[in-house]
Image (cartoon, rainbow, N blue to C red):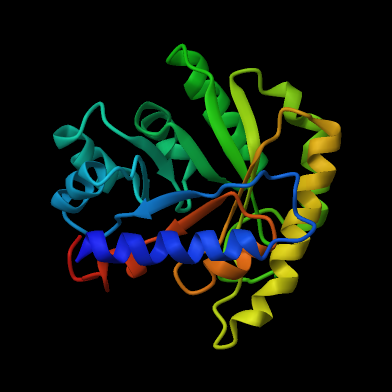
Amino acid sequence: MLKDNLHKVQTRIAEALARRTETKLTGTEATLVAVTKNHPVDVVLESLALGITNIGENRVQEAKEKRTVVPDRGVWHLIGHLQTNKARQAVALFDLIESVDSQRLLAALDKAALQQGKVQDILLQLNIAREEQKTGFLLEDYQAVVPTLDSYPNLRVRGLMVIAPLCDDIEATRPVFKEGYRCFCELKKLRPEIELLSMGMTHDFTVAVEEGANIVRVGTALFGKRDYTKK
């Protein structure tokens, strides 16, 4: 089932890339991150066997348990909200922390990376739609934090992460993704090393790719519905 689902998702990504018009600064490809949260570690192993090298997890503890079985394989992305008191564990576990959403977290990650002798790759999460139930920098707070980024020498800011509102009509997500791409372009002018724009999940990743995403975070379309009774 996963092999078939992977082919369908990859086909939809390729079709969305072909529909791109003006969003060229993020390149001509999109990396698929397989979101394995609330799925057993066997799903991670099957994904890796099929050539999916990027694994996304929402929680530090769940990733820690899975990485005891899969210690040195794959590129691991943290895509869920991270509390500052778990910064040390997150730096030890993840190759890319996508959900950096506050200056307090920037400082905590920088300290943890220094202690571990690591330069931690991160994305800045934006809350473009200003959803109260979601984390992420509001645009005015993001604009204020950009000039401070060089104050964190143990962090490497690679780009931005955006989550659009859950909409019945996926076209309603397009303005959010357009704004995410605009912010990416502005940041790249200031910091040419910026290269990653993570936008789009199972319900809206095709629109996100059309609007410039070069990372998409897909779980349900690959693995089916999650069992949230499992902790």
Image point 75% across, 44% down: which residue? 25
Query: Whole-percent x and y of residue 56?
Result: 38, 49
For residue 192, side relative to residue 215 (left or right): right
Query: Whole-percent x and y of residue 77?
Result: 42, 42
Residue 58 at least partly seen: no
Q: Which picture quadrant has residue 157? A: top right
Image point 65% across, 75% down: which residue? 173
Query: Whole-percent x and y of residue 44?
Result: 22, 47
Q: Nearer the viewer, residue 183 or 32?
A: 32
Q: Is residue 160 above or below residue 201?
A: above
Query: Whole-percent x and y of residue 144?
Result: 83, 43
Residue 175 at least partly seen: yes
Residue at the extreme top of the image, as rendered: 117
Image point 41% across, 29% down: which residue? 88
Q: Which picture quadrant has residue 16? A: bottom right
Quadrant of the drawing holding the C terminus:
bottom left
Q: Nearer the viewer, residue 227 or 175?
A: 175
